[in-house]
């Protein structure tokens, strides 16, 4: 099996594919004013055939895990077909979605039947009013019901993404811990990342995941080993808890050394890093099945341009205005 490998000997098993830029939430750190089409229509996003070609090219190149993201991926009417199409390649063992959860309660069983194997739900607060204030949507109860529905549908574990914000949710660590005590939830605190649109919020709210790490260690949580297609989280375990805690700390030294992920945007550009580059266009090679070899050559050739690290420490956010168009 060929394997995508870059100039720094990092191997890439994991593709994050955005399938729409559209989002119905207005999270303070992402799209505080809501999604603006700016002349882009839904028809501009990758079609089902294009999604099949790009994910199957990656699978031929050793990708074993695909995450569907956005925008809000479940806004696509053909979302079940997208799941089934991606999963139809036998090399793709894990197919996950990152969602704001508003459609979970209604649709999660159908997603699972179509082939979805993993779920990440974004929940930044366990207080309904604070959830509303952060997301612009009064949907806390629906999202919680959606997580219950995911367990009922047969998912044995659900991952929850929580963007860590100073004096917003970092002060509620104990509430989060209580929540996962009896639930098989991996709650992942993601450090707030600076984007072009979000530098003021970053100044006010960024807090290092290191403060959470120290508290967890003091409380007897221990770090688990990481698998080759796992995402970037440091995962902690505690014998008294059914759930786990993950920490995603993009500003930590050596964060990029274990990078195993590539991204494709909803308009078909290959992004080698979440931050700071324009992306390599793939779309001209997604029109016909016979272009598969040329597509694979462009993907593996493009990967050689991947830099050793992002430059977030230098305050360089590149072109990344916000993370909605490339999937966070
Ligand atoms: N709509 C889906 C959702 O809400 O999960 C998927 C897209 S969203 C952009 C993917 C993830 O990126 C979410 O977990 C979100 O919290 C995270 N995210 C967005 N902007 C971020 C930022 N500035 N810093 C850290 N995480 C961010």
Image (spheres, rainbow, N blue to C red):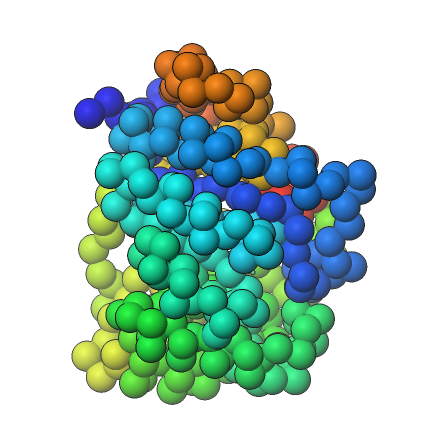
Q: Quadrant of residue 117?
A: bottom left
Decide if residue 275 is on the left or right side of residue 118. Answer: right
Percent position (x, y) of residue 21?
64, 46
Picture residue at 49% right of the left edge, 79% below the top: 144
Q: Nearer the viewer, residue 233 or 252?
A: 233
Q: Nearer the viewer, residue 90 or 4?
A: 90
Q: Quadrant of residue 6?
A: top left
Percent position (x, y) of residue 126?
52, 82
Picture residue at 68% right of the left edge, 43% below the top: 42
Q: Quadrant of the N terminus?
A: top left
Query: As displayed, is residue 216 above or below residue 296?
Result: below
Q: How many marks?
A: 0
Picture residue at 71% right of the left edge, 71% below the top: 136
The reply to whether residue 111 is visible in this rendering is: yes
Picture residue at 67% right of the left edge, 35% below the top: 44
The reply to whether residue 221 is visible in this rendering is: no
Decide if residue 111 is on the left or right side of residue 237. Answer: right
Percent position (x, y) of residue 122?
51, 66
Query: As displayed, is residue 301 above or below residue 72?
Result: above
Please state the quadrant of the image where ligand 1 appears: bottom right
Percent position (x, y) of residue 217?
30, 72
Q: Nearer the viewer, residue 209 or 112?
A: 112
Decide if residue 97 is on the left or right side of residue 131. Answer: left
Decide if residue 171 is on the left or right side of residue 10. Answer: right
């Amino acid at each position: 099996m060929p394997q995508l490998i870059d100039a720094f000997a990092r191997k890439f098993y994991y593709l994050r594919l955005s399938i729409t830029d559209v989002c119905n939430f207005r999270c303070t750190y992402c799209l505080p004013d809501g999604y603006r089409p700016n002349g882009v229509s839904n028809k501009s996003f990758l079609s089902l055939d294009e999604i099949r070609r790009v994910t199957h090219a990656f699978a031929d190149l050793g990708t074993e895990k695909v995450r569907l993201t956005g925008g809000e991926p479940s806004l696509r009417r053909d979302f079940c077909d997208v799941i089934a199409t991606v999963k139809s390649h036998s090399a793709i063992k894990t197919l996950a979605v990152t969602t704001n959860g508003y459609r979970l309660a209604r649709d999660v069983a159908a997603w699972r039947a179509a082939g979805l194997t993993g779920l990440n739900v974004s929940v930044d607060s366990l207080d309904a009013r604070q959830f509303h204030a952060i997301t612009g949507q009064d949907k806390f109860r629906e999202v919680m019901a959606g997580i219950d529905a995911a367990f009922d549908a047969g998912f044995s574990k659900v991952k929850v993404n929580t963007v860590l914000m100073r004096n917003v949710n970092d002060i509620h660590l104990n509430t989060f811990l209580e929540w996962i005590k009896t639930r098989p939830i991996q709650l992942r605190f993601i450090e707030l990342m600076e984007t072009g649109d979000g530098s003021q919020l970053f100044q006010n709210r960024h807090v290092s995941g290191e403060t959470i790490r120290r508290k967890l260690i003091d409380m007897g949580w221990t770090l688990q080993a990481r698998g080759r297609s796992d995402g970037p989280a440091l995962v902690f375990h505690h014998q008294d808890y059914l759930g786990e805690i993950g920490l995603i700390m993009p500003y930590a030294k050596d964060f990029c050394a274990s990078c195993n992920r590539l991204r494709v945007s909803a308009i078909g550009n290959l992004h080698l890093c979440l931050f700071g580059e324009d992306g390599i266009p793939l779309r001209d090679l997604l029109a016909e099945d016979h272009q598969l070899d040329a597509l694979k050559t462009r993907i593996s050739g493009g990967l050689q341009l991947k830099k050793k690290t992002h430059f977030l420490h230098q305050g360089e956010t590149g072109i990344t205005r916000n993370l909605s168009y490339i999937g966070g």
